[in-house]
Image: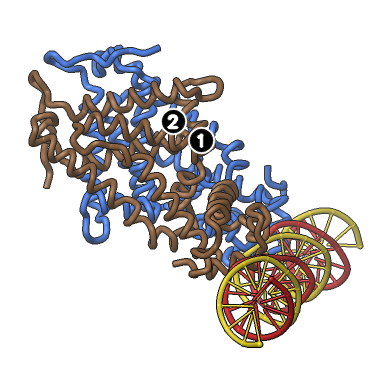
Chain colours: A brown, B blue, C red, D yellow
Amino acid sequence: MPKQTLDKIKPAKREKLLSEAAKLFAERGYNQTDMAELASRAGVAKGSLYNYFESKQELYLYVARDGLRRSRQAVYGELDPEWDIFAQLEHIFRQGAAFARRHPEYLIIYLNVSSAGMDPFAAKMSREVEKYTADHLKAVLARDVGRGLVRPDLDIRQAAFWINSLYIIFVASLVSKHFALRMREYLEIKGRLSKAAVEDQLQRTVELIRRFLAPVEGAAPPVQERN
Amino acid sequence: MPKQTLDKIKPAKREKLLSEAAKLFAERGYNQTDMAELASRAGVAKGSLYNYFESKQELYLYVARDGLRRSRQAVYGELDPEWDIFAQLEHIFRQGAAFARRHPEYLIIYLNVSSAGMDPFAAKMSREVEKYTADHLKAVLARDVGRGLVRPDLDIRQAAFWINSLYIIFVASLVSKHFALRMREYLEIKGRLSKAAVEDQLQRTVELIRRFLAPVEGAAPPVQERN
DNA sequence: CCTTAATGACTGACCGGACAGTCAGTATGC
DNA sequence: GCATACTGACTGTCCGGTCAGTCATTAAGG
């Protein structure tokens, strides 16, 4: 809920402002971001920021939600709901990686919501962030169990949780300094992470999930159901 | 590298100071933590902090590394290197969960290193954080491939990466507001996360990993090796 | 048309609170 | 009585938020 004034300014100006804000918040984090510097980068007076938003908090929340919408659009926008779970996952991971390359700032802001001192933001955002993805994953999994593409003894909630966990770590590794270093340490990658290496990693991860979801032909032991 | 003065004070005082510092950094994050408040909570004058440490940064880095050491001790301290990978993983997850309950502050600080504006700290710490775990996991996996407990077509670096990823998400879910909300959303847990629910989740996760690592009896397709 | 009035977006100097780091003086203990 | 640890008032800086005034645009009046 920004002020109405924000709607009235030239779209290009608004776009510039939001984009610079996202980049700066991602670069510095919330507390270290200086409204004066943001104003200057956006080519706007500091006072104007307060014509558009009540406070720094409101601006941050708006930018974070906006980035979330963009990321959702980029990842799910061109996804055909009729594809099977495996095609969808490959699409999701690939679009996620592409989005991480184009707009790391929004993913960094998302990751930041989980950091210390950001609990007020987490309380406001976490559920709305995760609900869409969780529901989508569970629905497709359930459907494909029905279609016989996924093993029937699967705990769908658990599976959705694990799959999304791998996705989070995957994009975090593309976007955060710490997670990038960690990935290179584990995979023993020496130089910069190339586009091809990312595609490879993506395929391996989807392959892992496929292996986990696929119905077992032979005498594989079903996972014991708790609850 | 704190100042020598830190070594000369009473252990109880030092302990109190470090513990309060960890809690405060975890609660507020680095920038929002006020040295005066820390001093007061630790029962020490602000000036004294600067007798022990050159700067806030140095104090933070010391506390973070200290927490890392404690966490490593708690998780790996009583681990018998002769156990097979599955026993070790169960131990690691269980000790990790217990440590998260006793000292969430250290894990929160660890997670924080990956957040925006913390890149200077990430550059200093990430490798030393991850190296130990990565090497340990890979070594045990390799050994148990040799022992026939783990499927031989496994890419060990990849497997170590994925296993540790699940561990990170697991402990993050016990310790960060955002990740806790996310887990409850996925698993459709209504109330507070009980100790029993954590133990259950832990066992399910280890079970998942076991399923992924175990040699396949029947006609399971080996994962195609890249590189 | 041209002049005047009204509107509201825009501006940046300014304010007040917060906070890292200092230091001159005091306590302690050997 | 010397050395060393301790102390908290103080300083300078930084930064979120304000506001009195400016200016471009549009509307009204002649």
Quadrant of the rendered structure where residue B138 is?
top left
Image quadrant holding the C terminus of chain B, namely top left
What number is the disc on residue A8?
none
Q: Give whichever of A37, B58 is nearer the camera.
A: A37
Q: Are marks 1 and 2 on the same chain?
A: yes
Image quadrant holding the N terminus of chain B, namely top right
Determine the residue positioned at 26% across, 60% down. Answer: B192
A80 shown above or below B224: below
Estimate the x, y position of residue B64 in percent, counting from the top left: 55, 46
The chain that hosts pointer 1 is: B
Other residues around mark 2 within 10 Å, as few (<14) / some (14–19) / many (≥20): some
Q: Give whichever of B164, B78 is nearer the camera.
A: B164
Estimate the x, y position of residue A109 in percent, counting from the top left: 48, 49
Estimate the x, y position of residue B174 in percent, counting from the top left: 35, 50
To which residue does mark 1 refer?
B129
Determine the residue positioned at 48% across, 31% down. Answer: A182
B2 shown above or below A122: above
Question: At label 1, which amino acid type do we have?
Answer: Val
* Relative to B47, B77 lies left or right: left
A128 shown above or below A170: below
To which residue does mark 2 refer?
B133
Secondary structure under badge 1? helix
* Relative to B70, B35 lies left or right: right
Quadrant of the rendered structure where residue B39 is?
bottom right
The chain that hosts pointer 2 is: B
Q: Give whichever of A206, A53 is nearer the camera.
A: A53
Q: Is residue A54 visible?
A: yes
